[in-house]
Image (spheres, helix red, strand yellow):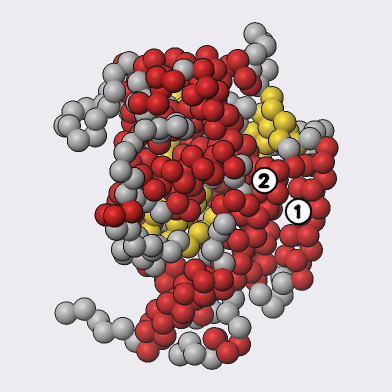
Amino acid sequence: MPKPPSKFDESIIRHFDRAFHRIITKHLVELRHVLSPYLHNMLFHHAKLHEIDFVGYAYELIGIMSYYLKSSFIYRFKSSDNPSPTHFYQLLIALSAFGKSTLHTLIKSSVMNEHSVRTTGELYDHRKPGVLEGFDVFVDETSAAGLQAGLVNGDKIIFSDEGENILKNNGLLVEENASVSSTYDLRTFILSYYGSLRTFNKELKSGSLAANIGRLTISCLSTSEPIVRMLARRFSGGQVCPMLERFAILYAETKPRYSFQRPKAVKYKMASLSQYIMVLGRIENIEFFFDEEAENLYASYGDALTYTMKQNERHAPWLSTRFGKSRDQSLRLCALLQGLEMAAVVCHDLFLEDSSFTNGIADKRFFEAAVKKTQQLFFPSSMNQRQLSIGIEIVQGAIYLTNKFIDQYREMFEPDKRELKRVTF
C-alpha cells in the first residue's frame, strides 16, 4: 500500500501549481523576440498544421540543432583560445494534456527520416515495422560505461517524451540524501562532460584505450515530477542540485486544439517540418564568432549575470548558481539559434528556386538540393574553413530567451515571502 503524502509533500505540489500558473500568465515566451519573421512564420505553420504547441516545438528544435551541430564551437571573443562546445541540456515541463507524445513522435520520425535518406536514399515511415540500420543516436536508458562506449562511436542524444522516467531511472536527478555509487556513475560522467570536451580513457586487460568521444545532447519533455522532487530538496534546505542547474528549463502552457481549427488544405509555401529538420542536419561542424557589436552586447550581458550571481551568492545560493550557469547557456543558445536561422535561409532559397518542393516531402532529391545550397550559401570556399559570424539580432534573441528561463526559474524556486509561508515544513 503506497505511503500517503505528508503535509510537506502536499504543500510542495500546491506551490508548484501556483507557480506554474503564474509562469504561464506572466512569463511565457514570445517567439517573435527570438526568431526572425520568416522562421517564426514557418514554425508557426508547422505547429498549426500538426496541432502541436508552437513554443514547445520551437524549443525542442533547439535540442535537435544541438545534436546536429556535432563538433561545433562558439567563441566568446575572437582571440579566445577556449571556445565553448554547443551541446545542450534542456527540459520542457508541461502538464499531462500538453500532447508530449505527438510532438516527440513528429520530431523523432523526421530525424530518423533524415538519417534514412542520407544513408540509403529511402524515405523512412515510422508507422511500418523494420530496422533502420546504423541509427543509434537516440538513448533511452544506459549506464556510464555504456554511454561512454557509445560516444566513442559518435554523437548521442537523450530525447524522450517521458523525461521524468529517464532522468530518474538513469540517476540524473537524485534526492538530497540518496546513496551515491562509489564507482564512476552516469550522473558524474554527464555532470563533468557538460563543461568541457572529454577524452575517454579505459584500462583493459589487453591494454589501454583512449579516444575523443562525441557530443551528448539531452532534450526531454516531462510532467511536474522532476521539478516537484527538486522543490522538495530546495525547501527542505538541501544543497543546489548540480545536474538541474545545467539544464535550461522551460514551462509550457496546454492549449486546447479543436477540429474546426485545422487547415483545410495542405500546400506548403514554406518548408515542411520534415524538410526543415532535414536541412538542420546539414548545419554541422562550425566555428562561430561574434561580430564586434554582438560581441560587445554578449560581454555586457555576461558581466551583468556575473554581478547578479555575486549579489545573491550568500542569501540565495540556488538563484546565484542559476545566474552563473546562464552565462554559458546564453552563449550556446547564440550558436543554436544561428543554426536554426541558417537552415531557414536554405529552405527559403530552395523554395524560390524549385516550386516542386511545395509537396512537403523530404526525399533524396530535396536532400541533395539542401546539401548543395548549404554549401553554396555558407561554405563556398573549397577549403575546410567553416567559420561563421553571429550578428546582434541572434544575441538579442538568446538574451531574451535566457532571461525568460531565469524569470520562470525564479518564480518556481525563489518565491516571495508570502508564498514561502504557504509551504508547510
Distance CA(mark 2)–CA(mark 1): 9 Å
Does 103 sit above or below residue 380?
below
112 or 359: nearer the viewer: 359
Residue 323, how many percent across, how many down?
A: 67, 62
Residue on which disc 1 sits? 302
Query: Which amino acid, mark 2?
Result: Leu
Question: Quick check: can you spot residue 179?
Answer: no
Question: Is the C-beta separation of discs 2 and 1 under 8 Å?
Answer: yes
Residue drawn at x 57%, y 67% as measured from the top left: 27
Given residues 197 and 177, the one toward you in this image is 197
Residue pointed to by mark 2: 331
- Residue type at mark 1 is Gly
- N-terminal of the pair, mark 2 or mark 1, is 1
Residue 421 point in image, percent of width and height: 54, 91
Q: In which quadrant is the N terminus drawn?
A: bottom left
Residue at the location (72% across, 72% down)?
A: 312
Determine the secondary structure under disc 2. helix
